[in-house]
Image (tube, rainbow, N blue to C red):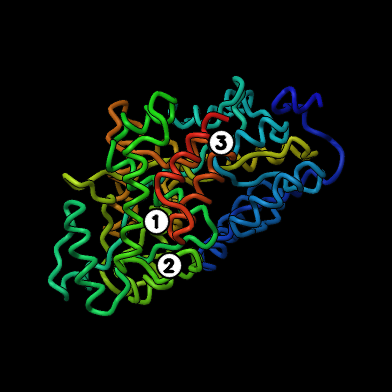
Amino acid sequence: MTLAAAGCTSAPPSTGGDDDSIRYLVQQPEDPAALELLEEHIAEFEKESGISVELEALPMGNMRTVLQTQLRSGDGPDVFSWGSGPGYAGALAEAGLLYDMTAAYDEYDWPIYDFAKERVTFDGRLIGVPGEMETIGLFYNKTMFADLGIDEPKNLADLKAAAETIRDAGTVPIAASDQEGWQGGHLLSMALSSRIGPDGMDSLLNGETPWDSPDVVAALRIWKDFHEAGYLPESPTSISYDSANSMFYAGKAAMLPTGSWLIGGINRNTDFEVGYIPFPAEDGPGMFSAGLGSGPMISAGSTKTEAALEFVDFLVSPAHGRWTIENMGTIPAYPVDTAKADVSPLFAQVIEDTSRLDDSKNPLGYNIDVLTTDVFNQAMWDGVQAVLTGQQNAEQVAQTLETSFQK
């Protein structure tokens, strides 16, 4: 009860047990090659520090199910990579399951962007390192578009016209997946952000505009209409995230709605030119939804916090940041010199787009689920699935979102 009331703990490092060995849990990457690269990179830390790191990986859905249980039982990892925001790190902090890193920020002088630190601050405590900066939009097969005589969509009408041409050519226009459910949050985020912009998103997230507003209804209805028009796979709720990615890689789908974290997988698995655009708005090109991905956190129950902090310091180093850019296709939430980085033209574009996240005049929209609670997120995920299966209409789902937001 004491831990739950405190939110998190910063007990001094234990001197018992094997302090030269820690467990590190990450989300299973889409491409197995990425995990092998990470293992090789961690081996460099092991050699320099003398600390052994046992790397473990779980699919995102499994982590959501078992992580809190493991941390409560004392069987969890010492360090794990998890999302920022109330519905992810915030829920664990409230349960007293995260080590308080506030003092470590001062000791190690980690140069995390201020806006990013806000996403891992709860009750005045810094309870983790924010993950990579990300955008969410539409990847598209530029080679296929050129072969079909389609220009890059500049507004929603262009996107619909492109989808019709692709559908009529016998290819899936947009490989939207929603079997796991969480993808629905991204689908809503991109359509809604482009429709109402960051100011409109702020108004929703601050409770000034209700979630059953006409704009939310319209954004939900876009995906319902796309499904009914044949722009999506026959049953998006039966398509897994990995399967949708594979459809795009194999040229069986022309567009893929997901985030910039997939850049590395796209570079390794496609042999055609790929473009990346925001989800279009009715009156223009729209804007990318943006947010922070998973970053390292330490279990409050770890008996090896000294070694864990040394490992986290490695994960916040300039060398690691440069490595993630060149090998993982992800952008850390702290300054890294990318002038001479060896990256693809596609990723160079993403770096430029994402650099605006630290701009006070941020022209980017938001990824909703890292800014809202577990209760709201579950309602959103279930609601988008219900829209795609026809079990509920957009108005009903929007009403449920508003009710959940008020809880």
- Observer-nearest residue: 147 or 104? 147
Question: Which residue is rendered at x = 43% and y = 59% of the image?
Answer: 388
Secondary structure under tag 2 reads: helix
Q: Are marks 1 and 3 in contact (CB under 8 Å)?
A: no
Instruction: Name the residue furthest right.
Output: 16
Location of residue 109 in the rendering, given as x and y in whole percent from the top left corner: 54, 27
Give the Cα separation between the discs numbered 3 and 2. 27 Å
Of the numbered discs 1 and 2, the one sitting upstream in the chain is 2
Identify residue type, mark 2.
Asn
Q: Please, is residue 242 above or below residue 85 in the view?
A: below
- Observer-nearest residue: 298 or 147? 147
Secondary structure under tag 1 reads: strand
Location of residue 331 in the rendering, given as x and y in whole percent from the top left corner: 41, 46
Question: Which residue is rendered at x = 46% and y = 45% of the image?
Answer: 397
- Residue that carries the numbered disc 1 in the rendered image: 258
Q: Are marks 1 and 2 in contact (CB under 8 Å)?
A: yes
Is 1 left or right of 173, judged from the image as shown? Answer: right
Question: Which residue is rendered at x = 64% and y = 35% of the image?
Answer: 91
Secondary structure under tag 3 reads: loop
Q: Name the quarter where the N terminus is drawn.
A: top right
Q: Please, is residue 334 above or below residue 246 in the view?
A: above
Q: Please, is residue 36 above or below residue 387 in the view?
A: below
- Residue that carries the numbered disc 2 in the rendered image: 245
Of the numbered discs 3 and 2, the one sitting upstream in the chain is 2
- Residue that carries the numbered disc 3 in the rendered image: 373
Of the numbered discs 1 and 3, the one sitting upstream in the chain is 1
